[in-house]
Amino acid sequence: MSDEVFIIQNQLGQFWTRAGEWVDGREPQRVLKTKHRDEAVNQLVELSAKDIDLRGEVLLCELDERQEPVIEASPHQTPTLADKAAEKAAEKAAAKAADKAAQGQQEAVPEEASEAPSSESEDRDEEPPLSAAV
C-alpha cells in the first residue's frame, strides 16, 4: 500500500467512515481510506446528493506506521466506538431491569383484582330473557 490515501472531510472537520457515518477523527482507523481519488470523489458526490447542505472535500492524507491516516481531530466531537458500546450496554441493562420489574409487578398483583367484575353488575346490564308465554 502506498504512503498516501484519499479521505473525505465535511465542513465541520469530520471524516466519513466505512460504516457510513461522520466521525471526529479521534479514531483514524474508522475513517474511509481510498487509494484512488476518483473513488473518494464518487463517494462524496453520492453523499452530496443525499444531503444538499453537505460541503465536503476530498483530502490527500499520509499514512502512519499502522497504515492509518494522519489527521487532526475535529472540534465537533462524535461518539467513539467505546462510547457507543457503553451506551448500548446501559440500554440493555435498563431494559433488563425494566423487564425484571414488570415481572415482579405482575406476580405481586392479586388474582382477585385481575378477575372480571362481579356477576351482580353484569346482571343489571343484561336484558331480561324473552318469555315464551304470551
Image: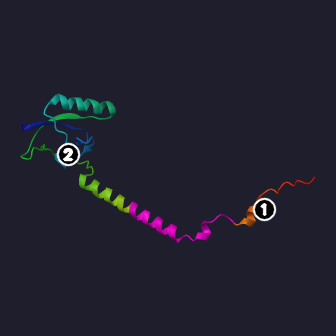
Task: Examine the rendered structure and indicate whether residue 33 appears above or below residue 115.
Answer: above
Task: Examine the rendered structure and indicate whether residue 103 appears above or below residue 42.
Answer: below
Tag 1: residue type?
A: Arg
Task: Examine the rendered structure and indicate whether residue 30 appears above or below residue 89.
Answer: above
- Marking on residue 57: none
- Marking on residue 30: 2
Toward the viewer: 98 or 69?
98
Q: Closer to the camera: disc 1 or disc 2?
A: 1
Toward the viewer: 121 or 51?
121
Tag 2: residue type?
A: Arg
**Can residue 52 be seen in this snapshot?**
no
Horizontal relation, residue 45 to residue 28: left or right:
right
Q: Image quadrant of residue 60?
A: top left
Residue for point 33% across, 33% down: 50
Query: What is the x, y in percent for residue 132?
Result: 88, 53
Residue for point 32% across, 30% down: 49
**Can residue 36 be seen in this snapshot?**
yes
Query: What is the x, y in percent for residue 81?
Result: 24, 52
Residue for point 55% across, 70% down: 109
Residue 25 located within the stretch drawn in magenta: no
Please give the residue where the numbered disc 1 appears in the rendered image.
124
For label 1, count other residues whose C-alpha is less than 10 Å away and answer few (under 14), some (14-19) or many (20+): few
Secondary structure of the residue carrying numbered label 1: helix
Answer with mark 1 or mark 2, whichever residue precedes in sequence: 2
Q: Which stretch did the figure color magenta?
A: 95-117
